[in-house]
Image (spheres, rainbow, N blue to C red):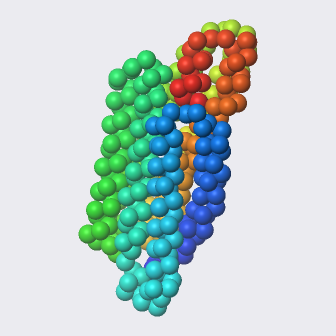
Amino acid sequence: MNDTLSVLASHFIGVIISSMFYGFTLAQTWRYFRTFSKDRWSMKALVAFLWALDTAQLALVAASIYQYTIVWQGDITMSSHVSKTFEASMGITSIIAFLVQLTYAHRIWRLSFGNILVTSFIVLLALAALGSGGAMVVKTVRDPLWDSTHVSNLPASSFYLSSMACDFLIAATQVYLFHKSRTGIGRLGGLITRLTVLVVNVGLITTIDVTLFLILFLVCPHNGAFLVPYILMSHCYLNSFLSVLNSRLELRELVDNDDYACPSIYTIASELA
């Protein structure tokens, strides 16, 4: 009984914070379409699709807490089960993370002039995270009791370790490519530093969230505290991705400065930032 109430409390807190994060997502999405209306249709379609998925994820977790507090009010038996809407939100979270990681892999492939080895590792880690996320959903569907969530720690750990490794490799590869582009010309180092700080900060958003979830899930799986960072995960991935897209305007202004005239930097600013 106490564990169930703790889980529902964490679920409720997660929905509240998730709604706040969604406000940032809306603002960044609006800024993207307003500022970069001339982007390729494929990129605009991807952003629109990710926003739609993120919207659906928030709607599902909100519908889930509605079921627990209104539809199943006072029903301890039903409240001890993971709702179908929350199970669906789990699948969407894995898909959003996978699509963002896959997009970064494609850009790294172009920035590295077709480096198959690094790109393949990133794609394999992203696929491993997607597969582990799917295993989490299947395990939850088969055994939908909140008290049984700790039993599925293998797929959950695999999902988050794969995600952490993938995010780290993406960030490290980008930083390496940035610094590889140094030529010692003028104030080029200032632009490289800005790009590096951007990538590291963006990567920290998802890394902190994933790490917090994994720690809470392994240390205290019964009280449901891990639900807060888990519910926020899709917002973290999408907001980090949109932050990179929306930073292009400032970076392109720096690139247009004669002091930064360097073909490799033009490539970075157009392909990644």
Q: Residue 164 lies in what quarter of the image?
A: top left
Q: Residue 253 lies in what quarter of the image?
A: top right
Q: Could you tell whether 237 is left or right of 243 in the image? A: left
Foreground of the two, 106 or 15: 106
Foreground of the two, 51 or 77: 51
Residue 159 drawn at (x, y percent): 37, 50
Residue 83 visible (yes or no): yes
Q: How many marks?
A: 0
Residue furthest to the left: 142
Residue drawn at the location 57% of the way across and 62% of the way down: 18
Residue drawn at the location 55% of the way across and 66% of the way down: 14
Residue 193 visible (yes or no): no
Residue drawn at the location 60% of the way across and 24% of the way down: 269
Image quarter (top left, top right, bottom left or bottom right) of the N terminus: bottom left
Q: Could you tell whether 80 is left or right of 261 in the image? A: left
Q: Is residue 15 above or below residue 115?
A: below
Foreground of the two, 166 or 212: 166
Residue 121 drawn at (x, y percent): 35, 31
Residue 125 drawn at (x, y percent): 36, 39
Q: Is residue 131 above or below residue 80?
A: above
Residue 147 drawn at (x, y percent): 37, 74
Image quarter (top left, top right, bottom left or bottom right) of the C terminus: top right
Residue drawn at the location 60% of the way across and 17% of the way down: 265
Residue furthest to the bottom: 74
